[in-house]
Image (cartoon, coloured by chain):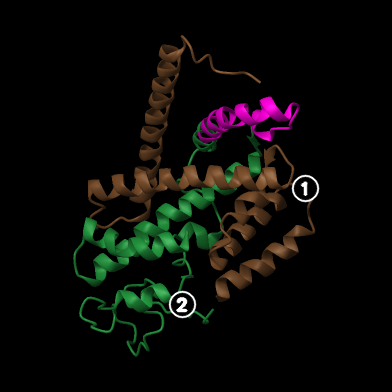
Amino acid sequence: MQPKVCRIGSAGRPISRLQGPVPAVRDGQKQATAGNPSFSQSHHFSRTNQSLTPDRRSSARRGVMTDETFDTDLILAIFKLVWSRRAETSDEKDEAINVEVGASTSKKNRGTTANASSLKVSCELLRFFVTEAVQRAAILAEAEGSDKIEATHLERVLPQLLLDF
Amino acid sequence: MAAEPRDGGFEKEKEEEEAAAERAELLRDRFRLSVISIANAEEGRDGISEPVVACIADLAFKYTEQLAKDVELFAQHAGRKSVNMEDVILSAHRNDHLAGLLRSFSQELKGKEPQTERKRKKSSKSDDKALAS
């Protein structure tokens, strides 16, 4: 992975990592990605691993976690929903097999559970996902000069975002 | 093996499916609310247009479903019934930076407990790595 340098622009925000391999001789100004013809989507995907945009939140710099994050109960409920759905479908499949084999240990019968700390890490992971999506789209929106994040901005960051997650 | 009665039980199956779909919708709505609050806390300016945040919420929901499946597979592969923190960190293996961030977050969590004092040293090391990259 190429070393990523975090440079702070004039607005106090880190310069977009979307620039990546393009030799950026832009000193401290906002990146105008829209006007850059060499900013093509093709070399964008050649890097399957884009680093996450650094945390701009002041609380993160202080190391305090007072921000919004997902509720662990909600995440657990979603997990259970998916697991029970999978258990149902796999039970239907295993039935035909088990009748012949007899006593086969189908692990999917016993429901999966989750650790408390694993839920917290999952919440953090999902928060990263949302945060990344918003921040990358915001960088794009700012580079294009609009104040509001629109659907076109999300569209363009989506491929790299999905590759990174 | 508990088998779903196929002969006369179609209506019951349908009802269960509908109930599951309703639960999914309810969870999806709660999820969307969380995403809205997180996204708005993140980006202050003029905000995010509404369809965009709904799109992000749906994407995150799908990602959560995939995460659930992955994490269950990892735990089963390790012969466990209960999902571990390592399973979640593994599911982020595609992006090294992300995995590092999660790992340091998990060290912090573990470090908050009194018994794992030695993990604190590791967390400061991985923090430096994450900041330097």
- Mark 1 sits on what residue? B114
x then y, percent, for residue A123: 52, 46
Q: Is residue A56 visible?
A: no
- Mark 2 sits on what residue? A6
Q: Please name the color used to draw chain B.
A: brown
Front residue of A62 and B2: B2
Residue A84 left/right relative to B27 = right
Q: Which numbered disc, 1 or 2, marks the residue closer to the eye?
A: 2
Q: Which chain hosts label 2?
A: A
> Which chain: green?
A
Give the SS element for disc 2.
loop
x then y, percent, for residue A147: 21, 61
Q: On screen, B107 above or below A100? A: below
Instruction: Say what amino acid the circle numbered 2 marks.
Output: Cys
Q: CA distance from mark 1 to mark 2?
A: 35 Å
Residue at horizontal 34 percent and vertical 44 percent from the top: B36
